[in-house]
Image (cartoon, rainbow, N blue to C red):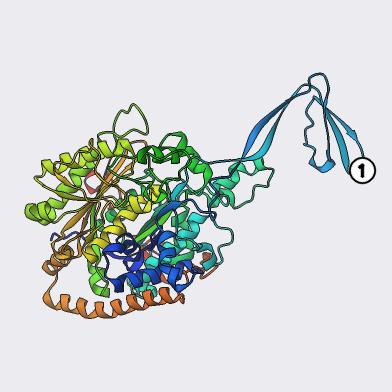
Amino acid sequence: MGGQALPVIVGFGGINGAGRVSGHHAFRRMVYSALPRAQQQRTLAALAALMQPRVGDADRERYILDHSLVRRVESQHFDPDSVSWNQRFPTQSNGQPVSFDLARKHLPDQIPPDWVVSPTSDTHVNVKIVGQQDFYLPTHREFEVKAAGQLPTGFEPGTLYPSRNHPRGLQMSVYAASDALGSLGLDWDTVRRRVGIDQMSVYAGSAMGQLDGAGIGGMIKARYLGQRVTSKFCPLGLAEMPADFVNAYVLGSLGSTGASLGACASFLYNLRQGIEDIRQGRARVVFVGSSEAPVNPEVMEGYAAMGALATDKGLRQLDGLAEDQEPDHRRACRPFAENCGFTIAESAQMVVLFDDALALELGATVFGAATDVFVNADGFKKSISGPGVGNYITMAKAVAAARAIVGERALRSGGLVQAHGTGTPQNRVTESAILDATARAFGIADWPVAAVKCYLGHSLGSASGDQLTATLGSWQDGIIPGISTIDAIAADVHHQHLSFSNAHRQTDPQQLAYAVINSKGFGGNNASATLLSPATVNSMLQRRYSKQQWRDWQRANEAVRERQQAYDDGMLAGTVKPVYKFDHGVLADADVELDAHQIRVAGQPVSLDLVSAYEDMHPEGGTR
């Protein structure tokens, strides 16, 4: 290994349709049928801790399985058979005025010129309208999209801490960050003491922002519904707010922060930021995440209007069903098969990166490493939502980066591709062409391809986070998830050098060297990430460190693993709550000391003796 720091994955957490992410529980829900019974029972226990199912033991397993992953939209979100909307309702007087009585308090501030208002009592008036008047009639309609990837039934993250009407995406952010923190198996105060206050970064956001009724969605539609706009709608709806919440209420971080947005590739955009911080020495600890809560009729209506979502009509046509037959919503997302659109989903994912020196020093568990993320646009486009050629560049670079580290032999025999795999007719053709061409160029035959959206749906900005944490599960359990919602690969899918399977595949984790996470976003946002397996990372670290240092890490890691197990047991028992520190340890001006060489915040120093990166261009007479 060279001298550059290696960004090691030492913790991960979150929540999606498969359940809690830490401990590989969400992954194991996806590959449930391939697990030994003991692991199945623990997976069920992890889900039951979230769902609190009120069913008897005989029905418990079936209920838990049926009420996780992609399924019919449930009432906790909205009723797809009866979605509220306002229908335009024009009236015409036809020579006789339209007349009605109403309470005086309901009169508009500006009386329309065609209205004649007459008092009928102290509290009511009569209104007569001559001519045409538009009204909006509250009514209901059936929604054409009825499937979504939803958090397990009964799990409401806002009930676990004083959520104070937070948007759902921010509630999920708090849960994900807390879960990632617990998964570390390390005392957080110990980590903070070892790391400078300016050497911790948080990069997290949401591609869509917070669009439910407690965020931007509430702000935009409040006046149209005759409601009041509150002071929380606007600030809590911002797209970078997941990072802000993690800093302010979970970690207390004073380090670098922000959110890079790239539509459905946003998680990888933020991972790129975190990797660069560690590789360049700007940070030693990085939390990278995304949270998306788009399962509401307004957001889904937007994607449906584009023809992007799988509708009941489309699913019936695929399966040859009559109009009065209910399609199988569990199989709404069918990547690389005959399909009709993607399935929207909610998810919050968070991973923790340390530099390798800190990981060894603290005995952190190594789940893998994230070495590179490549981002390229599509250039000129005919359609802003259509795919382009930028993904060829990102995939080729990601594979080349893997080859540079693991070598040709491991590249060809020890890889895995986590495809974007949305389940749309266009994606199955274009992405498979890119993956197949990349495999051919690098001499890879039968490259295993996974597409976990078939289980989870498409969580937009969080989707590549779902793919990353699922990859960690494959490395732990030696199972590559099958694309279980499909019967066969579509005829127009390119797969001469690829290996697709609708069944789970068992493999030796020690033979898995790397994975490539592929993500594509509207507007031409392409990102592909290179990840290294624990087996590869351990081999690399043993080359960098002495045998004594490695033995010291192994001894320290034993205690870390015990704490990780204790955290997991506590989560199953329901005794662990999310970290939420509102109005806790708030710093003020009096906590800051500043001179020309350093700033001290609550006694912790940050050096101001910076070195110019442009020494060769130093102006004459300047201070060197």
- Against 608, is 501 above or below? above
Left or right: residue 268 versus residue 571 is left
Quadrant of the drawing holding the N terminus: bottom left
Label 1 environment density (alpha carbons within 10 Å; few <14, some 14–19, many ≥20):
few
Image spot of residue 172 (x, y percent): 46, 59
Q: Is residue 25 visible?
A: yes
What residue is at 48 percent from the left and 55 percent from the top?
169
What residue is at 19 percent from the left and 38 percent from the top?
494
Which residue, given by chain and number where applicable, does mark 1 sit on?
122
Amino acid at circle 1: Asp
Left or right: residue 355 versus residue 253 is left
Closer-to-camera residue (597/548): 548
Image spot of residue 274 (x, y percent): 31, 55
- Against 351, is 234 above or below? above
- Label count reads 1
Image spot of residue 144 (x, y percent): 49, 40
Q: Secondary structure at mark 1?
A: loop
Which quarter of the picture shows residue 101?
A: top right
